[in-house]
């Protein structure tokens, strides 16, 4: 059996995803060592491998088949526009992609004025303003702390993720328009879905049952049994 390789977006999302996988019997003890400098983690018994990558690189690994499966936010999937199958909403990390700014910028959006939009997501912003709203804008790419841009006069508005809304509130900004809902998604390499159909289908069934609260755990027992036969590390 070949390895099924998972690419996980580093950080909180990876931890939450590993928590979900553990509940369906897919574990990786090696990954639990907080001091490890290893990059690739293996569970020999289950023939699965995991690695952590920068979120924006996860779709790349999956498109090229270096990972069969990836877990990453919908924001990254939209922004990267890679060829892959988005197969499951994990309902983790729920937030929204929004156009935000000071209340005074609202009229600039309704009057379709030529404005500057600062964002970490230039493709999402371009698609929204140019294709959906037919508004000509200048997109300014930033790499973080995007809320600063309208405060210091770099742009009139921003396109950014809003989760709790705290960052906006504490900086005198607000949501002006909503672009889309976001959450973590499971993505699959297009060839892997055909070649490893059975294994990936079982994984998807278990995960969607788990999320829906109807997971029975049959395969989890199988996975544990395999782990024991392999000398632990289930
Ligand atoms: C994200 C996002 C917002 C903030 C939203 O930034 O870009 O700034 O979180 O969260 P809130 O609505 O709960 O306040 P992140 O923390 O990833 O850092 P960044 O500003 O460096 O991108």
Image: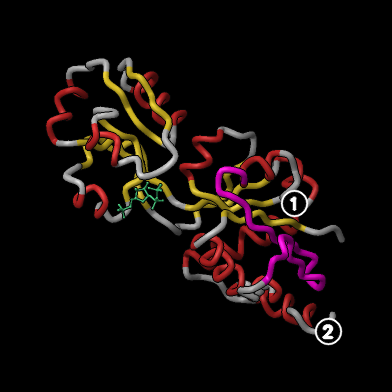
Is 127 contained in the magenta span?
Answer: no
Where is residue 79 shown, x and y percent of the image? 50, 35
Where is residue 95 shown, x and y percent of the image? 36, 51
User: Does the residue at mark 1 contact the one at mark 2 (Cβ under 8 Å)?
Assistant: no
Identity of the residue drawn at 70% across and 61% down: 50
Residue behind label 1 places its C-beta within 8 angstroms of ligand 1: no
Disc 1 target residue: 197
Is 39 contained in the magenta span?
Answer: yes
Choose mark 1 or mark 2, whichever is in front: 2
Identity of the residue drawn at 66% across and 74% down: 25
Disc 2 target residue: 231
Identity of the residue drawn at 50% across and 36% down: 78
Q: Quadrant of the C terminus?
A: bottom right
Classed neighbour count for the residue bearing mark 2: other residues with Cα under 10 Å, few (<14), some (14–19), many (≥20) = few
Among numbered discs 1 and 2, the one appearing first in the sequence: 1
Q: Is residue 15 above or below residue 29?
A: above
Task: Using the image as rendered, state which of residue 216 and residue 123 is in the foreground.
Answer: 123
Q: Quadrant of the N terminus?
A: bottom right
Identity of the residue drawn at 68% across and 44% down: 62
Instruction: Give how far apart the Cα atoms at labels 1 and 2 are.
Output: 27 Å
Name, please, the residue furthest toward the right: 1
Specify start and end residues of the magenta stretch as a single range: 36-57
Where is residue 142 shown, x and y percent of the image? 42, 35
């Amino acid at each position: 059996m070949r390895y099924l390789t998972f690419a996980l977006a580093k950080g909180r999302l990876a931890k939450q995803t590993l928590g979900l996988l553990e509940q369906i019997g897919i574990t990786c003890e090696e990954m639990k060592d907080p001091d490890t400098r290893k990059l690739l983690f293996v569970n020999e018994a289950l023939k699965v491998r995991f690695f952590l990558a920068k979120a924006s690189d996860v779709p790349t690994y999956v498109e090229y088949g270096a990972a069969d499966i990836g877990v990453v936010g919908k924001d990254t999937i939209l922004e990267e526009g890679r060829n892959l199958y988005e197969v499951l909403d994990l309902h983790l990390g729920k937030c929204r992609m929004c156009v935000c700014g000071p209340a005074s910028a609202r009229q600039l959006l309704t009057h379709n004025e030529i404005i500057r939009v600062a964002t970490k997501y230039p493709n999402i912003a371009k698609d929204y303003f140019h294709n959906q709203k037919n508004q000509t804008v200048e997109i300014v790419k930033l790499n973080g702390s995007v809320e600063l841009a309208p405060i210091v006069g770099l742009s009139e508005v921003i396109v950014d993720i809003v989760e709790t809304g705290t960052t906006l509130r504490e900086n005198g900004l607000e949501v002006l328009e909503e672009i889309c809902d976001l959450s973590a998604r499971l993505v699959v390499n297009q060839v892997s879905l055909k070649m490893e159909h059975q294994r990936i289908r079982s994984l998807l069934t278990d995960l969607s049952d788990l999320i829906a609260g109807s997971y029975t755990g049959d395969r989890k027992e199988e996975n544990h049994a395999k782990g024991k036969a392999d000398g632990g590390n289930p």
